[in-house]
Structure formats: C-alpha cells, structure tokens
Image (cartoon, rainbow, N blue to C red):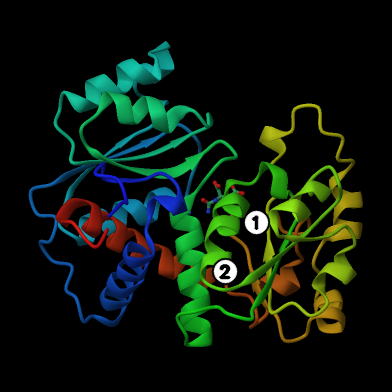
Amino acid sequence: MATTSRRRLIRVNDLSDAALAELFARARAFETGEALPGGRLQGRFVVNLFYENSTRTRVSFEVAAKRLGAEVVNVTPAGTSVAKGESLVDTVRTIEANGPDVIVFRHQDSGAPEVIERETKAAVINAGDGSRGHPTQALLDAMTLQSTLQRERLDGLMVAMVGDVIHSRVARSNMDLLPRLGARVRLVGPSCFVADGFRDLGFEVAHDLEEGLRGCDVVMMLRVQLERHQGVSFGSTREYHRRYGLTKERLDRCAPQAWVMHPGPTNRGVEMTDEVMDDPRCLVRSQVEHGMFVRMAALDMLVSGGAA
Ligand code: NCD
C-alpha cells in the first residue's frame, strides 16, 4: 500500500494519494457490505504488540483482523517476558520466529517503528508511537467526517484541534492528513501545548478557546497527555477546564453548527463536559465504529496488496 516496496503504515504519508483513496474505498465497501470480509485473511497471522494501554485501538484491530479471517495473538508487557526486562529487539525477534504476516504495534518510544521494521519481514502498522504518529486514528477520523458530511473531500472545512497538540500523536497524524483532503486546521490551546511556530507550517494558531472555536466546522478535542509531560507546567486540570474545556454553552455560543470529535479516552469534565459527550453533535461513537472498517481496509491492503 505504501509508496515504498515495504508494506507499512507507520505514517499517514506512507500512503500515496491513490493508496489513500483505495483505503477509504475499501473501508466504505466493508461498511456497506459491498465487500465481504469473510476469509480474506484466512490462514494469516496478525500480532498485536501493545506496550501502552489501549481499549478502542486494540479491540478494533483485533475485531478487524478476526472479521477478515486472520488468527490474532495479543502481546502486552504484563504476562510476557517484557515484564522480565526483555528488550524490544528480542521481543520482536521472538515474534518473528513464529512467522507473523502483520505486526500491529503501539509503543511509548517514537523510535520503535524503525527497530520493529528492522527485525521483521512482516507488514507493520503503527497503532501509536510516542507523540509522533497514529495513522489509523487520523484515517478513521477522516472517514467519520466523510460519512457525516456525505463527501469524500473535506475542502473548505475548518477543523479546530483543541488541547495538548504538542504531545498528541493523534494531532500529528491529523495535521498530516486533513490538509491533504482539503481541510484547514486551527490549533487551539495554551502556549505550552500549542507553539506559535506551528503557524510557519501552515496552521492557524489560537490561544483563546472562544476565538479558536469561531467559524470552525469541526472541533477535535484532544486528551491532556499527562504521561508525556516531562517538565511542562500546565497547571491544574480544574484551571485547564475553565479555560479550554468544551461546554455546551461555549459550543452553542461560538460554533453551534460544529461537529465534536475526540479520539478517546475522554476525561469527562476536563476536555469536555458530560453534556457535550451526550450531545447529538458529538461523533465519538461514530469514530469508534469507523475505526473497525478503516483497520479492516488497512490490514486487507497490506496483506493482499493495493494501489501504490
Ligand atoms: C489515543 C492514543 O492512544 O493515541 N487514543 C486512541 O488511540 N484512541 C489518544 C489518547 O490517548 O489521548
């Protein structure tokens, strides 16, 4: 599926425009039932190697692989030799000796993809590496918008990404993907999370939430990535919510027509209120639903080939 001969989805930009269009087309075909998943990965062996916690991503990769007929093995640090101190290299060598067709991995270290690719001949999919990338999340976000808006291109759309942009791999991957689909991206948050330098990369920047919400069509809320805050002075979560939390009142006043997204897990009452989570404009459930179809398409293309 990649522009290189290596079958990989480490970054959104591993996908050429043709491969991107093909991936969305396959995901939609699985969603509508036009393409039947049964047996497409029959006899194939997918390993989910997750060094970091995950609910929706791991579950959806597992369900996607199983719906395509693959055998799936889940490897997490607890319960394996990783807990005994085995290195990533040796863990991947052990997995490799069992002949996987695909390794789906999540790791806290942004250098992990290079190590894994070096040690395996399997196709590799990045399910999150440190704060660097999470391509299938951006792809499922885009598919959710395509299906909500009933169009493939997102030209003219203004997407405000709110919160801990600098530590967010979801933000990075969306910043790669959304402009390719025609959308404009505005980054909103305190300067410890949203550097003014992002303007030089073509993004709008706002440090005030209400200003950042005005005129946007989509608000993508990001979780505060406490686990990645080394030395970042961010203040209390209560103060953060007061300044950057999405409330129904703020949404109604500043961007009443906007769709609300969040990759999950959500800290209710920090990034947004319960009321916003339960609002019909909130697409969180639809995001999770589209995740499975995007991952089915990615696995299918990596194993059976696809447009480059
Ligand atoms: C995200 C992740 O782990 O990168 N979650 C997800 O995959 N849906 C976002 C987050 O943890 O904030």
Q: Which residue is mark 1?
A: 266
Q: Quick one: SS at disc 1? A: loop
Specify few, some or many for label 2: CA neighbours under 10 Å numbering under 14, 14-19, or 20 or more: many
Cα–Cα span, label 2 and label 1:
10 Å
Q: Residues within 10 Å of mark 1 (few under 14, many from 20)?
A: some
SS at circle 2:
helix
Disc 1 residue type (three-letter)? Thr
Residue 132 lies in quadrant: top right
Residue type at mark 2: give it.
Val
Q: Quadrant of residue 46?
A: top left
Q: Which residue is more in the foreground, 241 or 256? A: 256
Query: In the figure, is residue 84 to the left or right of 46?
Result: right
Q: Quadrant of residue 37?
A: bottom left
Q: Position of residue 218 (x, y in %)?
A: 67, 75
Numbered label attached to residue 284: 2
Q: Which quadrant does the C terminus fall into?
A: bottom left
Position of residue 180 measured from the top left corner of the image (x, y, whole percent) = 52, 66
Using the image as rendered, state which of residue 169 and residue 84 is in the foreground. Answer: 169
